[in-house]
Image (cartoon, helix red, strand yellow):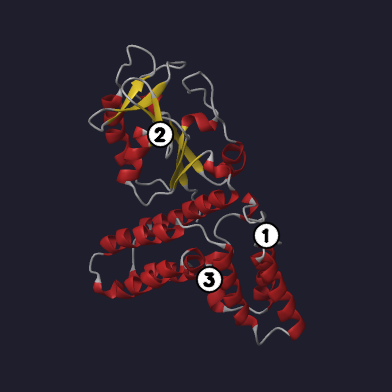
Amino acid sequence: MTTKPVLGISGCLTGSAVRFDGGHKRMGFVMDELAEWVNFRPVCPEMAIGLPTPRPALRLTKTASGETQMRFSKAPHEDVTQKMADFAANYVPKMGDLCGFIVCAKSPSCGMERVRLYDEKGNAGRKEGVGLFTAALLEKWPWLPVEEDGRLHDAVLRENFVERVFALHELNTLRAQGLTRRALLDFHSRYKLQLLAHHQAGYREIGPFVASLHEWEDLDAFFEAYREKLMLILSKPASRKNHTNVLMHIQGYFRNQLNSRQRGELRDVILHYRDGLLPILAPLTLLKHYLAEYPDRYLMTQNYFDPYPDDLGLRLAVT
């Protein structure tokens, strides 16, 4: 892939001073590390509907009829719900080329979850709202990788998000180059071990679907159905247990090449990873060493070994 994935991002997370208080929430990992490997398309929905910075704080209000509105927190509590809905209705459909979106947590426009809801008297309620812009985004593109800045501090969620971004980018590139049955089958074959690490039941379910490809006349329709299934499986973070099963499976490919000492050493490294004593980078490095020494055509195609740039260091953590 020669082009970079394009990510949408809440403007304040890039360091732009667009927040209600005139500040920003620049995120180091995003701007100092991830930015080398992706292109960003920043947007501040609140600025986009014509609000200034600084500005009075906005909040989500749950009306007696059950409707969620976006209003200013101070009197006269102007309602800007329709302005935000109109902006989202115009902007969100143009985002089909994106490979992910990073939104600002707790924001009444961009929060992905647990945004505070207020009643019409201004009393604080439960944290169970979704920002209006992000709600429109998730409804229009349910398969798109979307994460909040706060959640990206979690090593497991960070790695999962980046992995999905690069998978979707490869899939989008495939479509841009012109869909063929062979290209779709080859793509799925490359992702088999990766899918197995994420969700075994999903892996077993998607296999027969891909096998039915010859029955589809419309490859675009197949692509859209496949994309939804693929991204759903990858959205489930890979567990140490599932990773261990995949690593043991890969180890089996070298049973005839390795001596008993090497097999024992490899098994110990995998089990130490399983027990949380080593990062997954340790068994993967050893397996890649043996793969270079004893090439296997199938394993060498597997995206599992390099699902995103190594320089991001996402496999260094003991999770």
Q: Is residue 256 above or below residue 219?
A: below
- Residue at 54% x, 39% y is 150
Give how far across and how far down residue 240 sits, in percent.
59, 63
Q: Is residue 133 above or below residue 243?
A: above
In this view of the protein, can residue 110 be seen by the observer?
Answer: no
Task: From the image, state whether disc 1 or disc 2 is nearer to you.
Answer: 2
Label 3 crowd (10 A; few <14 / some 14-19 / many >=20) = some
Give how far across and how far down residue 280 sits, in percent.
65, 62
Give the camera-side residue of 114 and 254.
Answer: 114
Give the camera-side residue of 93 and 37.
Answer: 93
User: SS class of the residue under badge 2?
Assistant: strand
- Residue at 38% x, 67% y is 184
What is the three-letter code of the residue carrying label 3?
Thr
Give how far across and how far down residue 309 sits, in percent.
59, 54
- Residue at 55% x, 48% y is 158
Image-quadrant location for residue 257: bottom right
In whole angstroms, how far apart are the C-alphas of marks 1 and 2? Answer: 37 Å
Reading the chain from its start, which is encountered first: label 1 or label 3?
A: 1
**What residue sits right under mark 2 in the picture?**
126
What is the three-letter code of the residue carrying label 1?
Pro
Image-quadrant location for residue 288: bottom right
Give how far across and how far down residue 154 sits, in percent.
58, 46
What is the three-letter code of the residue carrying label 2?
Arg
Query: Which quadrant: the C terminus?
Result: bottom right
**What residue sits right under mark 3 in the picture?**
301
**What residue sits right under mark 1 in the picture?**
279
